[in-house]
Image (spheres, rainbow, N blue to C red):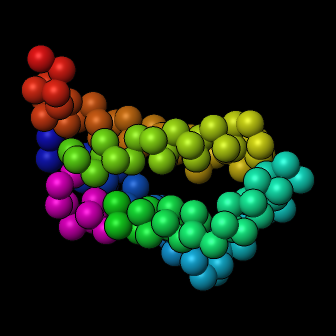
């Protein structure tokens, strides 16, 4: 479970989550122009005043916990709904920018598979 590959995937996933979570708060990574539907959706989330902030803090927290290797199996389960929402957002509203979303879902899946024995008691 602690192979070099798993370590690299965990660290890379943590860095991606921290970078994109912080970008939601401070906007330092230039992103491509989204489709009008995607822009409208993001504007509606931003107008609530709290949703994007909570998602950003959640991403940063998960990323940090992955980097310091703390509660990794639990954090990976918390990441499932977030990563699926990222994928579905890009799949339905912003297909040209789907690459990073697929990467996050695949890395989450790899790590979930590597920790599958930790989840066995949940399904018995």
Image location (x, y in percent) of residue 106: 45, 38
Q: Which residues are magenta?
A: 64-72
Relative height, residue 23 to residue 7 (above, below): below
Image location (x, y in percent) of residue 119: 17, 31
Image location (x, y in percent) of residue 113: 27, 31
Q: Quadrant of the C terminus?
A: top left
Relative height, residue 112 to residue 99 (above, below): above
Relative height, residue 39 to residue 116 (above, below): below
Residue 120 within the segment the image draws in magenta: no
> In terms of image quadrants, where is residue 112?
top left
> In terms of image quadrants, where is residue 77?
top left
Rendered residue at 52%/75% (across/down): 22
Is 94 left or right of 35, judged from the image as shown?
left
Rendered residue at 35%/67% (across/down): 61
Q: Nearer the viewer, residue 95 or 41?
A: 41
Rendered residue at 21%/45% (across/down): 73
Image location (x, y in percent) of residue 49: 63, 72
Q: Nearer the viewer, residue 65 or 30?
A: 65
Rendered residue at 49%/66% (across/down): 54
Is 59 left or right of 124, judged from the image as shown?
right
Q: Is residue 60 visible?
A: yes
The residue most toward the front is 48
The residue most toward the right is 36
Is 49 left or right of 83, judged from the image as shown?
right
Q: Quadrant of the N terminus?
A: top left
Relative height, residue 120 to residue 115 (above, below): above
Residue 68 within the segment the image draws in magenta: yes
Count of numbered labels shown in the rendering? 0
Q: Is residue 15 visible?
A: no
């Amino acid at each position: 479970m602690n192979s070099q590959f798993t370590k690299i995937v965990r660290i890379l996933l943590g860095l991606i989550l921290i970078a994109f979570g912080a970008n939601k708060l401070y906007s330092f990574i230039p992103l491509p122009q989204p489709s009008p539907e995607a822009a409208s959706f993001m504007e509606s989330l931003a107008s609530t005043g709290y949703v994007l902030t909570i998602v950003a803090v959640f991403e940063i927290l998960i990323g940090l916990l992955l980097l310091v290797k703390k509660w990794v199996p639990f954090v990976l389960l918390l990441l499932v709904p977030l990563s699926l929402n990222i994928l579905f957002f890009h799949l339905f509203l912003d297909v040209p920018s789907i690459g990073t979303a697929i990467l996050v879902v695949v890395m989450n899946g790899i790590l979930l598979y590597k920790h599958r024995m930790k989840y066995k008691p949940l399904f018995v």
